[in-house]
Amino acid sequence: MYKTIVLAYDGSISGQKALLDCKDLAQWNQAELWLVAVMPYNINLVTMDGGFPVPDIDQRNKTEFQKILADGLQRLAQAGYAATGELLAGDAVQEITRFARKVNADLIVVGHKHVEGWARWWSGSISGALVEHSPCSVFCVVTQ
């Protein structure tokens, strides 16, 4: 039985499907649920002569991700599940795995959309990388 589940939610169709399809897992009845949304850093170059990248989280981006998180929490509440939301910032894989370690998660749930060709090569797969780096089991809900 899973005691602590981290739901990685980005508001996408695959993320919504993961959230809605997985809510019927019997183990959820007694598990502590965490819903996380990961806001990527915007990297700006400070100077042209030896400058370095500085994380710049603009308020508009933060507000957008807070809405995504609130939407996911509302969907879970409507389905009868209590979850705690957490807005994270940085690389999605690093932040989700770091958070899973922090809360001693038994399971990470993430949506996955099949993407073919150069798009997959270029962007990589967050769900695939989570499987490689996660401290616990990863459940991927696949959409077409």
Image (cartoon, rainbow, N blue to C red):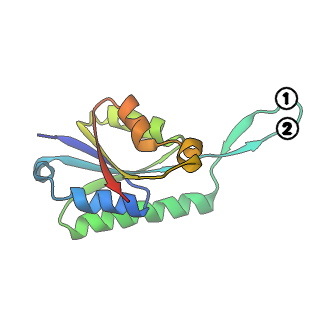
Q: How far apart are labels 2 and 1 at the CA level?
A: 7 Å
> Up-down: is 101 above or below 96?
above
Q: Nearer the viewer, residue 105 or 13?
A: 13
Q: Amino acid at mark 2?
A: Thr
Question: Which residue was labeled with disc 2?
Answer: 47
> Up-down: is 101 above or below 71?
above
Q: Which residue: 20% across, 67% down?
A: 79
User: Would you say 15 lies left or right of 51 here?
Assistant: left
Q: Residue furthest front?
A: 117
Q: Nearer the viewer, residue 105 or 133?
A: 133
Q: Nearer the viewer, residue 22 or 30?
A: 22
User: Would you say 109 lies left or right of 58 here?
Assistant: left
State yes or no: discs 2 and 1 in contact (Cβ < 8 Å): yes
Image location (x, y in percent) of residue 61: 59, 59
Quarter placement of the C terminus? bottom left
**Dot 1: within a 10 Å radius of its alpha carbon, few (fewer than 14), some, or many (20 or more) residues?**
few
Q: Residue furthest bottom?
A: 78
Secondary structure under badge 1?
loop
Image location (x, y in percent) of residue 86: 39, 50
Question: Which residue was labeled with disc 1?
Answer: 50
Q: Residue furthest right?
A: 49
Image location (x, y in percent) of residue 49: 89, 32
Residue 17's quadrant in the figure? bottom left
Question: How many labels were placed on the picture?
Answer: 2
Residue 23's quadrant in the figure? bottom left
Image location (x, y in percent) of residue 1: 11, 40
Q: Amino acid at mark 1?
A: Gly
